[in-house]
Amino acid sequence: MKASKKQTAMVNFSSYVGRVTATVLTLALLMAAVAAWGWGREEAYAVLFAAFLSVVNMLILGSRLIALPASAQRAAQRLGGAVLQRWTITILGLIFAIFWLRLPVIGLVAGFLLTHFVFLAFLVRERSRQRS
């Protein structure tokens, strides 16, 4: 029974992550097209890079959340490690984007804001579904 309940949770989480990822990437492509039209190609690349980096971070954190152990102390350690890993990847990705790829900061900020607002909208929608 416990294994089937965990399997159902993983399927629900996977479909949720798939919907969020598809929405983020679709909106990022649209925003990149608008950025390319309004600002230029570099800003469009920056929007896409930031959206891709956010999706990778979401997938890393989500995979860590699925694999949390039952013990509260070990779960807290693994979750702390996942958050640290996520911050490290984000900072290294931003350093790579700004200093090596020379992507404009405005496009990176726009991409990160887009993805975080999409994540927030999905979270609010999911919470409202749970309450009703």
Image (spheres, rainbow, N blue to C red):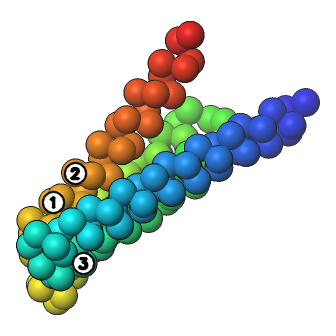
- Verify CB contact (< 8 Å) between mark 3 and mark 1: no
Give the residue at mark 2: 113
Q: How many marks?
A: 3
* Label 3 element class: helix
Q: Which residue: 58% across, 53% down?
A: 18
Mark 3 or 1: in front is 3
Q: Nearer the viewer, residue 10 or 68?
A: 10
Amino acid bearing label 3: Tyr
- Relative horizontal placement of residue 43, taking residue 79 as reference (left or right): left
Q: Nearer the viewer, residue 60 or 130?
A: 130
* Label 2 element class: helix
Q: Is residue 120 above or below residue 107?
A: above
Q: Nearer the viewer, residue 47 or 80?
A: 47
Give the residue at mark 3: 45
Point out residue 91 in the picture as x, y percentages from the top left corner.
Answer: 23, 67
* Label 1 element class: helix
Amino acid bearing label 2: Leu
Q: Is residue 46 visible?
A: no
- Relative horizontal placement of residue 32, taking residue 60 as reference (left or right): left
